[in-house]
Image (spheres, helix red, strand yellow):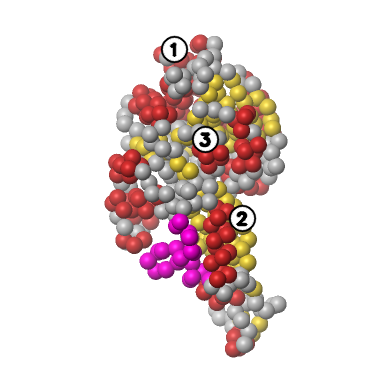
Amino acid sequence: MNRVLDYIDSHWQEALADVMRLCRQPSISAQGVGLEETAELLAQMMAEYGVPCQILPSKGYPVVYGELRGDSPTTILFYNHYDVQPPEPVELWSSPPFEPTVSEAKLRGRGVSDNKGNIVARLLAIKAFSQVRGRPPVSVKFLIEGEEEIGSLNLPAFVAQNRQLLAADACIWEGGEVNWKGQPLITLGLKGILYVELEARGAQRDVHSSMATIVPNPAWRLVWALASLKDWEENILIPGFYDEVQAPTEQEIEAVQAMPSEEEELKQGLGLEHFVKGVSGFELKYRHLFQPTCNICGIAAGYTGAGSKTVLPCQAKAKLDFRLVPKQRSEDILNKLRQHLDSHGFSDITIEFTEAEDPARTPLSSPFVAIVCDAAREVYGTEPVIVPTSAGTGPIASFTETLGLPTAHAGVEYPDSRAHAPDENIRLEDFIKGIKYIAAILERCSKLKA
Ligand SMILES: [Zn+2]
């Protein structure tokens, strides 16, 4: 193993140059910019790293799929994405977003952390084994999609249709990070999401507000409908909303208790006096990680400009997101939302479905979790932090549930990586350690099936 780590020490700069090469190629899925070009560049790069690959069509942007046989019967699947978030607002970047730059021991540029730096880190870890030993210790597969930043709408179907191709023993998620203390976070799950737009309509056109005596106002209809969804105690009132919520296991609760608290920093950073329901300590972490949400992302109706305009609008819209927890299903919640609105007399309010992903968590008792923890201790020289689930969302159910794979985060980011924001960056030391971490995980995974 030392020779593999030595190889990484003497070759990481070449990998860094390849991250820059990959990041110079824009791949903005939200704007349809450069996706095919990036898939081709990536496929070429993977071949250069000794991972034979192909570009597979999906219903949306293509999937880059690669695989390489290893020395043991174990197979590890890497999930990554080659698309990036739009760079705007470009004027807030210290250097042009698609001209990656190294300064102060950091690499800056759109995609360096999310997710191109992670892709190349994984490739170098595998190449290190191939160069030193001829083969990696386990077989590896790469599924690299181009639609993660726009909700991975076509990924669940792609995964479901390619179960055989993607069969593996465990999955390493697209990225991962260390905290400010340098402890790697081993995140084991994600929440799901249901994103919808509600719309109420009234007259054919806006009318004079004196007509409010007799003309129905869709803004009120929408406000009443929204008010029916949640009470002042933050309980979500959609019948059956909580039915499928699975209580966390004892191990998950213990892990959350052990997670360092960032409560005060968060409160100060946000300028808040207290959190929802006044929660703090364990209750705050529990609520944040294990509870589903019903959130209003935006409301629009009528006149909101300067001065007064006495108008009765003809239309009102609200965007809502529900963050879901295992075993809630986005489709089921969508049905329950429709039934709730109908039974409260809001059949006129339409629901436009925008986006959905299902939640999933890997049990802490999975042998793969122990392997990742051991690898983290070895490479980072410190105790990792086990995070049973993030409060965020991704297409994890395709891997954890559809393919049945224990799934853990491992990557090259740190708390100031600024994913999705101007000056996205990674620290070079995290890049090097991230490569070694993947190598250490793969080495240990050879015993996963023993
Ligand atoms: Zn992202």
Residue on which the image places disc 3: 404
Q: Pick whichever of labels 1 and 3 is earlier in the sequence.
A: 1
Residue on which the image places disc 1: 3
Query: Residue 142: image x %, image y %?
Result: 58, 29
Q: Which amino acid does label 1 sit on?
A: Arg
Q: Which residue sits at x=54%, y=11%?
A: 134
Q: Which residue sits at x=58%, y=70%?
A: 342
Q: Nearer the viewer, residue 253 or 242?
A: 242
Asked which quadrant contains residue 144, the reply is top right
Q: Which image quadrant: the C terminus?
A: top left
Tell me, yes or no, whether the two marked residues, 1 and 2, touch with CB atoms within 8 Å.
no
Magenta-highlighted residues: 225-243
Q: Which of marks 1 and 3 is in front?
A: 3
Q: Distance between the residues labelled 2 and 3?
A: 27 Å
Tell me, yes or no, whether the two marked residues, 2 and 3, touch with CB atoms within 8 Å.
no
Q: Which of 39 and 429 is in front in this view?
A: 39
Query: Residue 181: image x %, image y %?
Result: 32, 36
Q: Which amino acid does label 3 sit on?
A: Gly
Q: Residues within 10 Å of mark 2 (few under 14, many from 20)?
A: some
Residue on which the image places disc 2: 354
Q: Which of marks 2 and 3 is in front?
A: 3
Q: What element carries label 1?
A: helix
